[in-house]
Image: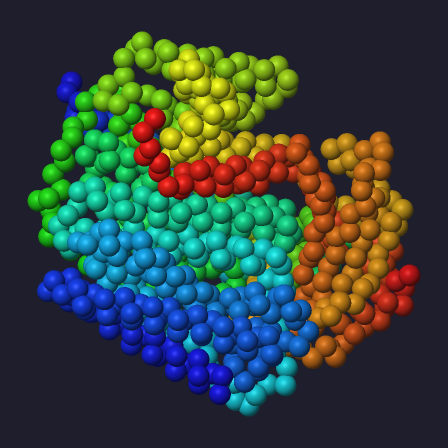
Amino acid sequence: MNQWAKFLVGGAVIAGALAYMIYAGVTQSAVYFVTPAELRAAAVPGKAYRLGGMVVPGSLKWEARALDLSFTLSDGTATVPVRHKGTPPDLFAEGRGAVVEGSWTADGYFKASLIMAKHSEEYKAPHDGTQAGYQELIKTLRGDGR
Amino acid sequence: MTADLGYGMTLVALVLAIYGGAAAAVGARAGRPALVESAQHAALGVFVLITACFALLTYAFLTFDFSVRYVATNTNLGTPFYYRITAVWGALEGSIILWSWMLGLYTLILILRHRDSARELYPWALATMLGILAFFLLVMTIAAPPFQRQVPVAADGRGLNPLLEDTGMITHPVALYLGFTGFTVPFAFAMAALITGRIGDTWLVLTRRWTIVAWYFLSLGLLIGGWWSYHVLGWGGYWAWDPVENAAFMPWLTGTAFLHSVMIQERRRMLKLWNIVLVILTFGLTLFGTFLTRSGVIASVHAFTQGSIGALFLGFLALVVLTALGLVAWRWEAFRSQGELDSVVSRESAFLLNNVLLIAAAFTVFFGTVFPLLSEAVRGVKVSVGAPFFNQVNVPLFLSLIFLMGVGPLIAWRRASLESLKRNFLWPVVLGVAAAAAAFILGVRSALAALTLATTVFVGATIGVDFVRATRARLRAGEALVPAVGGLLRRHNRRYGGFVVHLGILLIALGVTGSHAWSVQTEATLRRGETAELAGYRFRFDDLTAVEESNHFKVVGAFTVSNGRVLDVLRPAKKFYPQEQSPIAYVDYRLGLKEDVYLVLGDFARDGTQATIKLQVNRLVSWIWIGGVVLTLGALLAILPERRTPA
């Protein structure tokens, strides 16, 4: 075999291996983006989804001691109950957008392994610091602090 | 007033840059040095004007000039002095100024260094630089103007994104942009080589050190970005394969390939076309990265402002790539290679394989990053691939690359004999295998970790073998040890600089492997006085306090960390900024060579009696930062001017 043939074969082997690795990587780690309505229409248990929606006001439950977080995501037409083990992220709150990654379980809820609160792309206009939650927080913590 | 002055200067700089680019091109074409000289003056003028813009904007920040919209949106009266300076490039408009300023600076250095030494290529390189500079000034004028009036003048600004209140803000963007803009210079010389038809080695020799400098700053930018992510963002990691990270990583990969393939052209007169293509690709990817992150086509955790700028960058990218490829096609005949590949077992092959693997890695990253777009276009469903995809495909590629790092520098050019292979690689292979065996005996059961360890030790040993052999030769020639080593490093600074950089990469590889294989984490909700345990450490929740800072308010937890004896008190916090929708986590950690203890305050009871924390014990992460320091030393050694004194 002459040198060029060897290099050609080597190149083909590398290209083939890369193509296979990419193919395998994609099939194993593909995450499907769905809305609650789409998930409700055809949920496949065990398949990896990224589900986006709004946290329904009043649905959020956080059991700090057990680290159990549960809430309902809605897109206006359908709702999906979500459960997660762990602290909610900083930007997470009722009435706000959230994206969760995980899978649909046979027990009828979405088991989230990752929660991403939706970061607004544009920086928000300032609340003037008189916002009830903020002031109250300062008060309660200061009062108790030391 | 400030806004109008700044906008006016930007406009003048734009006109000057366009004039200078045209003058340099016409001067080069018509052989009129006077025009080229005029272009140089224009370049100086552009640099002075951008510097003035930059100074003006900084002044506006320092004096809280809220008549400038950019100042009003990125600072407020509470922003501390230090962060008012870094806030200048804290958002899109300011970072474009920084980028242009660096381009202007590089253009000046290019003029000073190459004005007399590269008569043929220099005017065209200057024209290219000024053309690219003109594009950035155009962006500053129409798409992302930093000098826009705020009507009516705001009483107070919105404030800086709290995540940017960090010392990393001064070094991370600066290093990254110095890297990005640095690759413009090799690109400009490559264009000059194509236009003049002198695609021999001249442009490579001229840009050799430029490339190392650009590569180094890009590496540094990536590393500092990792450090920033690790200690500010509070998710416990340093790399997430986020589109923004990938955008900076792709040019790093192709730039690394370029750095290696130039050596083959210098030595064997091969791969001329490949080198030109690599430099076009690297420069193109720096533009693509900006397009990707600023256009919003790919969702990212980095919340950047969007606008028409994405389309502008895409258009410019298309223009650059089409022009460059057109020039390549035009000069097609000149690319015939003078050298031939002699054997599969040779240094040429090792370098070639290194390039193929680096490009494969760059392609993988590219593919994974744009995958949601592809799948939506082709199949109509939005599918993304996350970190598992990137890790799975890249780990074999990077392991092979590290292995080649040991082979490439020692294997013979043209054709390696069995004898020379044995002489160079027997001991390193033995040591590598022994290291893996030792790790197995010590209880390492991760095949990947053992393989990485074996490869790293192998590569480290090849570097050792080479160094010891070269030093011995000098000792035999009668030199004392210290002058022998010093002379070796100084005389062959590029070679040994490269080796030291390789050592740095090895340390980074160990850190990455260790942190992936052995890090552990858990979450716990504790009442005051309660403890949680992780990996032999005990964490006791002592108390929770509230503190008021100049522009925010924070809740700080105190946790005593012990492992038999008390080690430290860690104080992770949550910061509440009035202008923010939600709190920002402030992590606390105790770094160590073996492992870091890393604490994030998650949630807390309002009365301060209970807190939820995320505990991590991250293994070997410090070696990534140490590797970065070693890499810096190596890069410094490699860019020392070459000394050609007689022995």
Hey, which quadrant is residue A82 in on the image?
A: bottom right
Residue at horizontal 44 percent and vertical 40 percent from the top: B635
Looking at this view, name the residue that lies furthest to the top: B419
Viewer-proximal residue among B585 and B316: B316
Give left or right: position of B22 versus B604.
left
Task: Where is residue B122? Give x, y as percent.
Answer: 23, 56
| Residue B106 in view of the camera | yes
Residue furthest to the bottom in view is B152
Residue B338 position in % (x across, y down) = 13, 33
Residue at (51% x, 66% y) in the render? B89
Q: Position of residue B4 (x, y in %)?
A: 44, 85
Relative vertical location of residue B529 with respect to residue A12 in this rendering, above or below: below
Quarter holding the C terminus of chain B is top left
The residue at the point 47 percent across, 25 percent down is B483
Give whichever of A78, B503 is nearer the camera: B503
Q: Position of residue B515 (x, y in %)?
A: 59, 36
In the figure, is residue A10 to the left or right of A84?
Answer: left
Q: Is residue B120 above or below residue B314?
A: above
* B268 sits left or right of B431 in the view: left
Which is nearer the eye, B633 or A94? B633
Looking at the image, which is closer to me, B315 or A87? B315
Residue B414 falls in which quadrant of the image?
top left
Q: Is residue B312 visible?
A: no
- A53 vs B15, left or right, is right
Colour theme: rainbow
